[in-house]
């Protein structure tokens, strides 16, 4: 799906996703752009982003000491095209010569990958497939103990300069304005991986929040019981108690219904989003994420202004633009969540009758999904920006 995009901005965006993680491991992450690299090109930005996220993510994951780099250069081709050459280099454990032929096969992993764990063996195969669809390839040079250099070759089209890159891409990192006379909002970071907790805590502290950490769902419950947070950044998959189960219990604690909860997970499938909404989360983001996207989402949920005076943008579906009914109360929304989560059809029917009186437009919108027993869709409609209550 080719379209114009700001190449340098895309590359910087991908690097920004991993800067804090690399910093937490003490790894410099260098970016080198050749002077001839075009600002704008015509190509599939989404596929290129996915390739780079996989390769840069692997470099950070497998490297414990040394440094990382992303190098980009371009060569003009006949017919108004560019050949892009992107190199992702690390100083990790490297790959043996015998492993390289199998590296790009589905469900295959190197020895280093098997030792670290957590992968599927699909990322490199998918990345190479995308690159070949775009007239290029992904290759690797490596030797044990000397790291890896993955090279991405792509062919893209020439594109006229479409103006300021950062503005066009929406990639500028927002700065949040916290209430000046109040104590900083509390943020609880929950993740079983210390590296992830560290980078999120660092990010939240830089934004001005008061931050604490928990390494499991049960620890998150224990911390929240004595230190109710305004915002919880919750990992989904953790040893012991998973994040979704912790959310249910936190909602039952004092202050739990008022807290805003964002689930951060590497399992970025729509069914997971629907599941965590069932369990009481307010929103969902896949890992890795852009810092700018997370800060905007936090601003939306906590109703914070941006440093330039704007309110955080809230996406409103076009079909909902005419909705003028008052928002659902926190208590009523929680009652709906519980009834839908437990598939309590009698309670759902009672709530539907009440909704028809208090919010007839919203009741009409959710009725088809209730009739079809599509409880995931019901909850999505009930938790849309127009139906959700403002923060207390």
Image: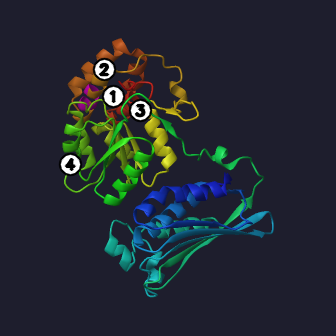
What residue is shown with label 3?
A: 302
* Residue displayed at 81% across by 65% down: 79
Tell me where residue 332 appears, x and y as whole percent: 29, 22
Question: How far, Cα to Cα, is label 2 from label 3?
Answer: 28 Å
What residue is shown with label 2?
A: 352
Q: Which mark is residue 204?
A: none
Query: Which mark sits nearer the N-terminus, 4 or 2?
Result: 4
- Element marked by disc 4: helix
Mark 1 and 2 residues: CB-CB less than 8 Å, in contact? yes
What residue is shown with label 4?
A: 219
Question: How far, Cα to Cα, is label 1 from label 2?
Answer: 9 Å
Q: Nearer the viewer, mark 3 or mark 1?
A: 3
Q: Nearer the viewer, residue 223 or 280?
A: 223
The residue segment tinted magenta is 335-339
- Element marked by disc 3: helix
What residue is shown with label 1?
A: 370
338 in magenta: yes
- Element marked by disc 1: helix
Q: Nearer the viewer, residue 81 or 311?
A: 311
Evaluate whether residue 268 shows in this view. no
Mark 4 and 2 residues: CB-CB less than 8 Å, in contact? no
> Farthest bottom residue?
98
How many marks the image carries: the answer is 4
Question: How far, Cα to Cα, is label 3 from label 1?
Answer: 30 Å
Question: How far, Cα to Cα, is label 1 from label 4?
Answer: 36 Å
Query: Which mark sits nearer the N-terminus, 1 or 2?
Result: 2
**How was the colour assigned to the protein in this rendering?**
rainbow
Q: Is residue 323 above or below residue 115?
A: above
Quarter-wise, where is residue 382 in the image? Answer: top left
């Amino acid at each position: 799906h080719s379209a114009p995009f700001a190449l340098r901005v895309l590359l910087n965006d991908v690097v920004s996703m991993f800067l804090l993680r690399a910093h937490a491991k003490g790894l410099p992450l260098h970016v080198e752009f050749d002077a001839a690299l075009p600002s704008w090109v015509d190509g599939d930005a989404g596929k290129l982003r996915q390739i780079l996220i996989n390769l840069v993510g692997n470099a950070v994951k497998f490297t414990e000491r040394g440094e990382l780099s992303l190098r980009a250069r371009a060569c003009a081709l006949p017919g108004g095209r560019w050949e892009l050459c992107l190199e992702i280099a690390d100083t990790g454990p490297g790959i043996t010569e015998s492993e390289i032929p199998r590296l790009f096969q589905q469900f295959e992993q190197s020895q280093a990958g098997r030792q670290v764990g957590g992968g599927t063996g699909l990322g490199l195969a998918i990345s190479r497939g995308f690159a070949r669809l775009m007239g290029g390839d992904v290759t690797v040079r490596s030797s044990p103990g000397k790291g890896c250099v993955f090279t991405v070759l792509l062919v893209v089209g020439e594109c006229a300069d479409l103006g300021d890159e950062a503005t066009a891409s929406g990639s500028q990192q927002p700065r949040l304005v916290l209430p000046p006379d109040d104590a900083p909002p509390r943020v609880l970071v929950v993740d079983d991986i210390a590296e992830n907790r560290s980078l999120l805590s660092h990010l939240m502290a830089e934004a001005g929040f008061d931050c604490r950490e928990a390494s499991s769902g049960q620890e998150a419950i224990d911390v929240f019981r004595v230190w109710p947070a305004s915002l919880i950044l919750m990992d989904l998959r953790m040893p012991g108690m998973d994040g979704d189960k912790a959310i249910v219990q936190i909602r039952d604690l004092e202050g739990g219904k008022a807290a805003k909860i964002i689930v951060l997970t590497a399992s970025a499938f729509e069914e997971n989003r629907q599941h965590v909404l069932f369990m009481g989360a307010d929103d969902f983001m896949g890992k890795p994420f852009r810092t700018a996207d997370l800060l905007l989402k936090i601003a939306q949920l906590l109703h914070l202004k941006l440093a330039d005076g704007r309110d955080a943008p809230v996406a409103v579906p076009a079909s909902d633009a005419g909705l003028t009914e008052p928002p659902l109360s926190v208590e009523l929304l929680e009652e709906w969540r519980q009834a839908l989560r437990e598939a309590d059809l009698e309670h759902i029917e009672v709530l539907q009758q009440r909704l028809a009186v208090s919010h007839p437009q919203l009741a009409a919108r959710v009725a088809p999904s209730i009739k079809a027993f599509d409880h995931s869709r019901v909850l999505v409609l009930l938790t849309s920006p127009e139906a959700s209550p403002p923060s207390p």
